[in-house]
């Protein structure tokens, strides 16, 4: 039995939960496998790391050679979308293969109900040893894992606590990305080698407030990043976009986010350094960046653009360590011979804004936050260089992982295995992906909304304080700048999309959305 933990670092027993419960699928023998040896799986899961910052996706902002290596040696998904673009709910969807309204985890900073099935329990029945190391962000310790060593809440970039399977809190010195890699490799070395394994390596990077590792401080100081074409978006015709509170200009904080005269004594963001860790960090941000800022005396657009440059330099510096650690893990698999029969996946919990529309953060059904990176390598099964442009949703991750291991997929899982797509097989596949976001008004004042993404269009219904629709042609308008809803010539397309949307809502049993849809 496992007790829940709070995201505040103080442990609190919230009750005992029974590991077996009614309503689950009966244990059935796994299907016959093509291979005699079951593959291991490592799922590297980052936070807020968007495809705009990955060179395999065509990004010119930074090089990510180790993520690119996974893509080139396997497959890259170009249209992998999420069901709810926010951190904790995305992880809950990975574990359950279900939408937020069914797994109960709609918002961040809640407690995931461990009295529900998770797909790793099925792996355990099929002989797998399972582990999760690093960021989980669910407020509880789900069943289905033989080993857990996870960050409480978001954890910290430096000298963070971790919560183990016994609900014990242990502080590990060092930079969190390095620590997570070290703990993951330690588990690989100490595991039961008679069993195949499934391991989630959950990284805190690249989450706000973007504290780089010491070797990466100033890594991009000589780079002047071009402003996104939509940086000065005026949000014309898009009420939800106009109402948000996530702009670099107004919402991004100089002290906490950009480290201008940071409070190293009292802020929980910066007061965890050892003297040795603090020195290079303080020297860089206080003696260089803060002095530069003071001297410039910026305001207006000049200030907004300076903040944008500092944001990207910090974000990408944090991503440097992420990619470097992925390389260390890949090298370990090579050295130990595990690479030959280990599926390696790299994904993020959702997309993220790197200045598009003047924003940071995520949440919207719009392209930059809806789509998330996903690359996968499986030697001998997935052909190197495979490109997948079909609509894949993160509800499909769990059934695909089960399918890869020859494990039965419970009927309650809402997603479908895209293993046939990975293997280059022709197979009927979804034409629409359904989405539903809930968290409002804090922290970024994004109206709740639901909708669908097809190969050409995005249709969204916003609700809550106001009720309205938005329609975008993502082929002609990939940045979602022109709301076509109600425009002449789009009547038939809109009606067809509304019919499809209702079908998706009914298929996935989203009763709240159906009520809203039929109310107006």
Image: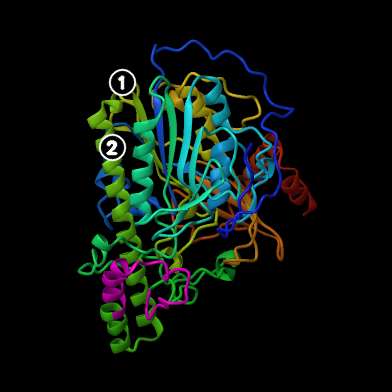
Q: Which residue is mark 1?
A: 380
Question: Residue 443: percent from the left, percent from the top?
Answer: 58, 66
Question: Residue 36: percent from the left, percent from the top?
Answer: 39, 11
Q: Quadrant of the C terminus?
A: bottom right
Q: Which mark is residue 60?
A: none
Q: Nearer the viewer, residue 496 or 452?
A: 452
Q: Quadrant of the N terminus?
A: top right
Q: Nearer the viewer, residue 102 or 117?
A: 117
Q: Which residues are magenta?
A: 259-286
Q: Residue at x 65, y 62 (%)?
A: 440
* Location of residue 30 by image quarter: top right
Q: Which residue is mark 2?
A: 330
Q: What coloring was used for the rendering?
A: rainbow
Q: Farthest left residue?
A: 222
Question: Residue 122: percent from the left, percent from the top?
Answer: 57, 25
Neighbours of disc 2 within 10 Å: few (<14), some (14-19), many (20+): some
Answer above or below: position of 47 versus 189: below
């Amino acid at each position: 039995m496992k007790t829940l933990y709070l995201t505040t670092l103080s442990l609190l027993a919230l009750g005992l939960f029974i590991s077996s419960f009614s309503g689950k699928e009966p244990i059935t023998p796994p299907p016959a496998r093509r291979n005699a040896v079951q593959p291991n799986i490592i799922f590297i899961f980052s936070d807020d790391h968007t495809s705009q910052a990955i060179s395999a996706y065509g990004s010119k902002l930074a090089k990510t050679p180790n993520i690119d290596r996974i893509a080139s040696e396997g497959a890259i998904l170009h249209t992998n979308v999420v069901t709810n673009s926010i951190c904790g709910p995305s992880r809950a969807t990975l574990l359950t293969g279900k939408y937020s309204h069914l797994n109960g985890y709609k918002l961040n900073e809640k407690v995931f109900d461990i009295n529900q099935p998770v797909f790793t329990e099925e792996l355990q029945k099929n002989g797998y040893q399972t582990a999760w190391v690093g960021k989980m962000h669910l407020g509880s310790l789900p069943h289905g894992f033989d080993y857990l060593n996870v960050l409480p809440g978001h954890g910290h970039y430096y000298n963070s606590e971790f919560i183990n399977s016994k609900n014990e809190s242990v502080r590990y010195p060092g930079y969190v990305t390095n620590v997570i890699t070290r703990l993951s490799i330690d588990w690989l070395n100490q595991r039961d080698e008679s069993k195949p394994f499934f391991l989630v390596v959950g990284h805190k990077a690249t989450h706000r407030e973007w504290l780089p590792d010491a070797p990466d401080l100033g890594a991009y100081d000589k780079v002047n990043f071009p402003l996104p074409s939509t940086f000065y978006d005026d949000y014309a015709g898009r009420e939800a976009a106009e109402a948000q509170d996530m702009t670099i200009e107004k919402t991004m904080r100089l002290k906490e986010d950009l480290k201008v005269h940071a409070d190293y004594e009292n802020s929980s963001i910066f007061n965890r350094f050892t003297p040795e860790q603090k020195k290079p960090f303080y020297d860089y941000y206080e003696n260089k960046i803060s002095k530069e800022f003071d001297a410039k005396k910026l305001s207006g657009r000049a200030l907004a653009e300076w903040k944008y440059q500092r944001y990207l330099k910090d974000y990408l510096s944090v991503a440097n360590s992420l990619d470097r650690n992925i390389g260390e893990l890949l090298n370990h698999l090579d050295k130990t011979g595990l690479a030959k029969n280990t599926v390696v996946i790299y994904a993020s919990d959702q997309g993220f804004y790197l200045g598009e529309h003047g924003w940071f953060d995520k949440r919207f059904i719009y392209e930059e936050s809806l789509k998330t990176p996903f690359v996968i390598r499986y030697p001998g099964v997935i052909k190197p260089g495979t490109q997948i442009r079909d609509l894949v949703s993160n509800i499909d991750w769990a059934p695909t992982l089960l399918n890869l291991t020859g494990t039965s997929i419970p009927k309650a899982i809402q997603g479908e295995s895209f293993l046939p797509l990975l293997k280059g097989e022709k197979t009927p596949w979804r034409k629409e992906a359904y989405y539903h976001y809930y968290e409002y008004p804090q922290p970024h004042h994004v109206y709740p909304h639901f909708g669908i993404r097809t190969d050409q269009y995005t249709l969204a219904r916003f609700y809550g304080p106001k009720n309205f629709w938005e329609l975008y042609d993502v082929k002609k308008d990939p940045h979602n700048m022109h709301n076509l809803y109600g425009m002449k010539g789009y009547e038939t397309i809109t009606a067809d999309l509304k019919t499809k949307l209702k079908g998706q809502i009914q298929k996935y049993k989203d009763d709240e959305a159906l009520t809203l849809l039929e109310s107006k």
